[in-house]
Image: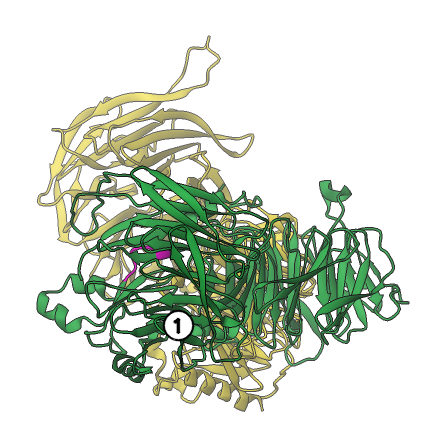
Amino acid sequence: MGEFKVHRVRFFDYMPSAISAMAFNVHTERLAVARADGTVEIYNFADNCFQEKVIPGKDGRTVEALCWAGQRLFSTGLNGEIVEYDLENLRSKYTVEAYGGPVWTISSNSQGTQLAVGCEDGTVKIFELVEDSIQFQSNFDRLKSRVLSLSWHPSGTQIAAGTMDMIRVFNVTTGETCTALLQMMVDRAAGANKKKEVAVWSVVFLSDNTVISGDSAGKVQVWDSQMGTLIRTHLVTKWDVMALAVSRDESSLLAGTSEGSVVQFQFISARLDQPDKEWQRTRTLRSHSHDVRALVHTDTAAVSGGNDAHLVVRPFMEKVVKGSKESAPCKITFPHRSLVSCGKKAGILLFQFPERLEVWRLGESNENGIPGEELSVTKKPEALIHLKRKGDDHICCSTLSPCGGWLAYASASSVRLFQLQYDNDSIALTKVKLPKVLRWANQLCFSADSSRLFASFSQSSVLVFALSKSEAKYVHTLKPKSVSKQAVHLMSTSDDGQWLATANSDCEVHVYNLKKLKYHCTVPVYGSCPSAMAIHPTGSNVVMVHADQKIFEYSLEQKEYTEWSRSLAKKGLHGSWLNRVAPVTHVSFSASNPDYIILHDMNMFCIIDKSLPLPEKDSDLCNQNQLRSMNEAARVKDSHAFKICEMFKNLLCVGLMEDHSLVVVERPLLDIATRLPAPVRQKKFAT
Amino acid sequence: MVAHADTRVVHRGGSKINFRAPVITQDSRFLICVSGECIKVFSTSTEECIHHLQGHKELVTGLVLNPSNHLQVFSCSEDGTIRLWDFTDGILIRVTLLHLKTPSTLHSVPGKRNNCEGCSRGHQCYMHLCYGIIYLCVDYLTSCALCSQGEYVASVKDNVLHVYFLNKKTFYRFALGTSGEMAARNAFTCVACHPKDDCIATGHGDGKIRLWRNFNQEKEYTFSTVHWHHSGVNALCFTPEGTNLLSGGLESVLVQWRYGQEGQKDFLPRLGSSIKEIVVSPDGSLFCTSHTDNKITVIKNCTKVSAVIQGLVHGDGVKTALMVDPRTKALVLNGKPGHLQFYSLQRDQQLYNLDIVQQEYINQSNLDQFEVVKAALDSRGSWLATVEQRSAKEVEISLKLWAFDEHTQSFVLNTTISAPHDGPISEICFSPSSQNSTTLVSVSLDGHFKAWQLTQPDPSDDEEASWSCDFVGDYHSLEPKCCCFSADGSLLAVSFKEVVTVWSPASWDLLTTLSQPPGAIQDLCFGRLSCSKYLLGATDKNLCCWNLLTCSLEWSTALDVSLLLADPLSENVAAFCGAEKTTDLFVFRPSEPRPHFSQQALCTGRVTRAVFAPRDEPLDGCEESSQWLNRSQLYFLTHNMELLTFLTKPEEERLMALSKQVAVLKKHKQEFLHTSCLLFISLFISQFALTLSAIMTLVLSILT
């Protein structure tokens, strides 16, 4: 395949939103991450931290705190509402007004039967979980100032509440402050900040009746809740301690600071082999440039997120096997799904933002150069359309037809379809009405000839619409033969218009025959979620890449795995391929050579040549640079199927255009970092 | 050439007192430190050296208070003995010979692996227990520490921390990133154990301090990191109660960390030079820091420097000649950078430092700084001339003349001559004339020598007398190398390559030239007293003696002389000759070409600095071969900066008589062992884990 003309696109100014809250469900190993714009993302830690679900945000809804109660996910925000999410249809299920002003925190007891919320007016309210709803149960004694943090005692009988300047422990059944003196006054910062109130940002109630607090004076304090006395103070930072997280066995505690560092405390004895233990400060992890707002302590790793929008998973080396995939630190910045659609035939790109869509025409160049050379642009890339969405709900998916003539997007409350007409330099956008049957969609997709629009709906069903001039007509609803209620997160059609494949977060891949408009088959379910999928334009094979980096090719006509896929499974993938952290987010094929599969993740793109032998276990996987320096004969001998290019970093999309040029959409992390607000001032050595 | 049994070359003063951490006694009154072959006991309040504990035949390598009697101290040495001393009276109580499997391991000298025959099967370890002290060779280790309960030993080497539990016979190995750039930054530099908690503090090459806990687990161990030092941490020490951790390094700042609240720290800055060891007195009231410039500082109440014990500063090398100050009888040589030190040979203590350069020394590598390269004192000690030089891009030189001020009893800068010559100055010397007017001659590689004289200003001016140039001489534009005045000051000899020119300082006339090719003259020296008619000159291959009355060569002999030195109080001349790798010494009178004393293989390396220090009173009772030592003592510096001298038999006998030593040489027995008391450990840790456990098994077998 050799050389490509590459459009190196850096004008997609995607900004990930700051992480404001996190909650981890230890039973299902799902991490819920809330961002400042109200988006809630679900990561599956059992499946290589794959971003399984994204619940789009809504204007006016901020998330201050998240909590799991069993399988149910709740959030609260400064609009004073408690929201429960519908994790199957990826939308909010209902909202309940707490009537206490902005709600700062929410916490469920370990049994998952009650929710406690802390409000601006100083009240702690208890809600009872009933089926499909929650019910107000009681109010605790009102405190003087806002309740910023709450933590249940594991037994569920007591709650510690952190407010301004103090920590209070309540008895849940009576709602009163416990009989013993349970008001712990937190010291204010020394010096000039003496007058400033101290906010107790986070409390943790341990089963041995110890309360640990993190506050805005930079202290982590250990309290005895039965006596109400301070045991130990650790001054961690000059700024705020924003978040605390404790491990399940209560032997390790993490504290996130405004400096971007995460400090670990461990419950260890001062003398070896002796039972009396105390909390000792141990490691300091520095993985963020800005405030760490949310922390989770899983059994093997510290998960942190904050204002710099990175989700960082730092495994504890003593808990994981060295050199295994689990031991690799992982930094998730970009969503694990595509925000870019390519109009292959027209050379047009569609960028999706939460509140708008942008359509760009790629630049052109007539020159040819040597590899690595920069070509001068005869026609600059041009922004064609800025399309603002209607309503409060954020855009959850969007798509552009391959011809570039149609554009569709969906939010939680509406789906909109537009026709684009190009007239030399001017462009006309006409809205096309969609039938009422489609109120919302999880995924949208156009057929290769732009004659049909597919929209995935609840319970993995797909609605088919026929597009004609200025009209969209409902044709059919495709339903899978399965009981899964999960939403579809990947959808792909074949170029010949015969097949449509969908993948949902139960790891199912359903294939429909579009000619007959009926369900065709289901690919055997694999244990890891497909992260990218595409149907071969000629071979009627579907290629799936899973979150654990495994690659499968399934023949739709034979309804079995292809020969190549079997040989790949037999031989096993190369170790360094499997140890990559970022999932593959896009698969496509070359029109010129049917043996090529093009795929990419955040750090590299790769062309798999099915005709070449698979790499040996001990050979170098990324050998493109070495091959370049070899002579022809050695090159043939050493080359293998995986051709990996690491020249481009922070990739959001790699697509092959019809004119055989490659579009590479990059979003350098440095550009994101420069657009963040300034971090807190830290003394640097020699400055 | 006979070996002379009645003289012995000894380390005499100037030994490193910072070689090992000092010991503070239980009552904090005394500070005991190693000093070459002897042990010194200082008072912590007056800085006075109270006792020299002499007896070891080799370098003393370890010191520890006797755990069962706090008025006694154990010492071990490379001579393979452990000695017990009463330091209040300065008495040797007991000598223990070390026995370990085979007698050949008796002198297990750290640093000499060849002597480790007793451990032929790769067991490169020696352990010895006596009187409740453990002896462990620290040869292969960067640093090691024993926990106060004696449960485990922590030792560090490169990037690995080893913790060995003595009771459980298990050991744990913790390695830090060992690849590439990380390796140097993570390298362990020192280790200390907390006295109460099970916490090990380690210092690292990048200035970090790590506090290790839970180190009895292979995986679940944990450490926290604090960072203040910008370069490697050299020393760590916990206070006796474990409330504070002290650290020090190149910054010469003593940092005091609160244990458990490591964010809070106190500093004691400007301690003079890089900190090498830190010790805290048992009651915690005194801190002692030993520094790289052979200094021990006593710090009281964590805040105040109360005493400074300064030994001979071993700088990067002595550039000036060795001199003896006629007033104080002190040895004058380079000290700290930019300073001259006055070092009392009798008291083995630095008297004072004279700041010559008078510029702040910046502790940074690759920085060209002014150095004192030449110094000369006149015969009465009232004038000092110094040359300082900096060779950044072009050579910057200045010549300074210092007058002795009777009032302050110190030298005061009189004249600064910047750029006295166009090239580096190769030698300066004062004329020995007894009159008030003295002449300084400086010889430079720019082809000239200059004579400087003190000129009295007009009486009308208020100015003091200052120095100015009196004469500029040259000879066929050859490069002069060295110069020398005759004993009465009437002749000046200046060597220009192969030619020696003799000048009259009174008229600055060239009197005669002498030459004995081939070879440029390296050193010149006039004979003294009855031999003052002779002029000695050394080339790289020959030693020549000219008779100045006849202006002819008296004799010459083939010798590679590195240094010629005349005793001012006798006719003797000492010639140090560089043999292959060692130095030979010949002492002779210029009148006869046969040496009356010679010693071969005096020391390794070339000797280029030596001095005859006049004795206070002449020595009697010397045998004939050591007669030359009865007026003056000869001190010389080896290439690795050891100050050595000759000790005659009468002197040695006198010393022996002075010290009331009770030498009880006992065969070592495993009599009593106190596991609870302080243990002093010496151990070779080999590359193999197996070896280590083998050693430890040995210890335990001795213990039980």
* Residue beneath disc 1: A517
Kind of residue at badge 1: Leu
Per the rendering, the colour in which chain B appears is yellow
The x and y percentages for residue A661 are 23, 53
The residue positioned 23% from the left and 66% from the top of the image is: A623
Rendered position, A240 above or below A96:
above
Residue A456 in view of the camera:
yes
A34 left or right, relative to B157:
right
Q: Quadrant of the N terminus of chain A?
A: bottom left
Foreground residue among B82 and A253: A253
The x and y percentages for residue B200 are 57, 69
Range covered by the magenta-colored residues: A645-653
Foreground residue among A313 and A72: A72
Residue A264 in view of the camera:
no
For residue A206, what is the image quadrant? bottom right
Q: Is A646 in the magenta?
A: yes
Q: Residue furthest right?
A: A179
**Few, some or many C-alpha atoms within 10 Å of disc 1 (few <14, some 14-19, many ≥20)?**
some
The x and y percentages for residue B627 are 34, 57
Foreground residue among B426 and A664: A664
The residue positioned 19% from the left and 64% from the top of the image is: A626
The residue positioned 40% from the left and 25% from the top of the image is: B415
Color style of the picture: by chain
A128 left or right, relative to A554:
right
Per the rendering, the colour in which chain A appears is green
